[in-house]
Image: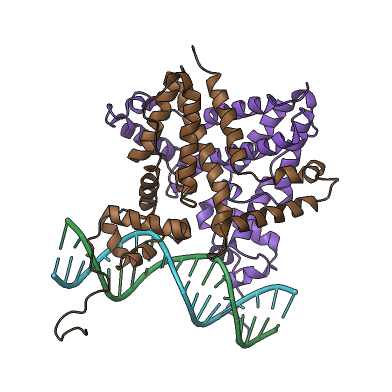
Chain colours: A brown, B purple, C green, D cyan
Amino acid sequence: MPTPPGRRPRRTEPRRALSQGLIVRTAVAVLDAEGLDAVTMRRVAQELGTGPASLYAHVGSKDELYELMLDHVLGEVELPARVEPERWQEQMKEVSRASRAVLSAHRDIARVSLASLPTGPNTLAIGEFRLALMRAGGIPPRVAALAIDTLGMLVDADVIEDSIILAKTPPGEDPWRAFREHIAEIRRYLEALPPDRFPNIVGMAEELTAEGGDGRFEFGLDILVRGIASYAEDG
Amino acid sequence: MPTPPGRRPRRTEPRRALSQGLIVRTAVAVLDAEGLDAVTMRRVAQELGTGPASLYAHVGSKDELYELMLDHVLGEVELPARVEPERWQEQMKEVSRASRAVLSAHRDIARVSLASLPTGPNTLAIGEFRLALMRAGGIPPRVAALAIDTLGMLVDADVIEDSIILAKTPPGEDPWRAFREHIAEIRRYLEALPPDRFPNIVGMAEELTAEGGDGRFEFGLDILVRGIASYAEDG
DNA sequence: ACCTGAACACCGTTCAAGT
DNA sequence: ACCTGAACACCGTTCAAGT
């Protein structure tokens, strides 16, 4: 049916009221589909059938939107029901693995985590649980404060390192295939380096480009948690 | 003197021939003055008295320019003259501290390091030295390959975490004053949190926002190097 | 209070045309 | 081979004007 004369033509979408929550959820949908760089004020506005200026009534800036997205996503991390003091180190690892998995599932959102200090409720809840775990493990407050930073940096950096290559994948291609392709290219490059200047790199080209993923993360996690535990004041 | 009739007006700068080296040095000058986000193709071209299209004869893309800048900057890292096997752990720390200092001195260039796999000659030279150190320390190749990644992530993440706040400082203001200001603001925020939901964060607000800097880095560095050394096959 | 269109001052990259 | 101007398809943010 055509629009009757004198009636304003309806927009294609019935106008849903804008809200911060709706904007954040829409932005995360764009993130998941195309990566963080595709999340622009203009793009999110377009997805909501409006112009970029309309978003500024609900979020202060693009950076603020990015932090809201991060906290929204970290709400997916399922924390253990309670601190089990006798296995605090294992729970420490579980929380770190869960955070890594959630961040990995949302493209390169970890870039935001490394770039900002935690202020959102979900982000703080994870920090609170980690502190409770270390307290239960007898870690002095000053050490716990340092440890929480270092552990967070490991998680973020690990996710970012992978997500960068994945984010470069042209849409349509299998990102993991592109990832392996890229690694293989690096290996050939390292193997072709002059062996007199770079004997160890050339000799270890295979190990340096081994399917990293979980192994690299577990290595850092294990060393860090053991190192933290060495500061325990009493068992 | 006015330009004689029929003579083309000279540009203000005598035209220096463009080259990759000149472009990279100019880009690093902009980085040092205003941070990585100010390094755009247009801005670098303007600094050289030309248009952005002219740069593409010497660098393939902005991302490639960023990686060239990173390697240029890492050329400032002074590596020890030789591997001293009996103190390989201490040398490992020295190289990490030197890398951190150089990256810190160039604003948020560490973002590029975390986002790319090392291919430049200076970057590779640092990696080669680290591998030689671990080899001297009896670390198995597979562990050394993991360790070099983890150590690099720690250095990059640590520098980035600081540089982000510093990069936000409006030009003209003292960045370290702004940095302390920002930390103090976070502390007040954490102290004002509901103590029933976040007892440990509220209770440890002071430790969590303590003047971080070197302490945090040395903490992570010490734990990682000790952890790596625990994999040594023979002394 | 919320939303909008238009504008401002920017981006990276391509390409045909010049030397 | 190198350089250029102009164009294309984008940015974040502000602001006066509308409802």
Q: Is residue B147 visible?
A: yes
Instruction: Provide residue B61's location: percent of width, then percent of height.
Output: 61, 64
How many marks the image carries: the answer is: 0
Q: Quadrant of residue B100?
A: top right
Q: Is residue B80 visible?
A: no
Q: Nearer the viewer, residue B234 or A172?
A: A172
Instruction: Provide residue A233's location: percent of width, then percent of height.
Output: 49, 13
Q: Nearer the viewer, residue A112 or B15?
A: A112
Would you say B61 lies left or right of A35 here?
Answer: right
Residue drawn at (37%, 57%), measured in percent from left and top? A27
Instruction: Provide residue A192's location: percent of width, then percent of height.
Output: 80, 53
Q: Residue furthest top?
A: A234
Q: Nearer the viewer, residue A10 or B224?
A: A10
Which image quarter holds the N terminus of chain A? bottom left
Task: State whether residue B83 is above or below residue A106.
Answer: above
Residue drawn at (40%, 31%), measured in percent from left and top? A80
Residue drawn at (70%, 52%), measured in percent from left and top? B119
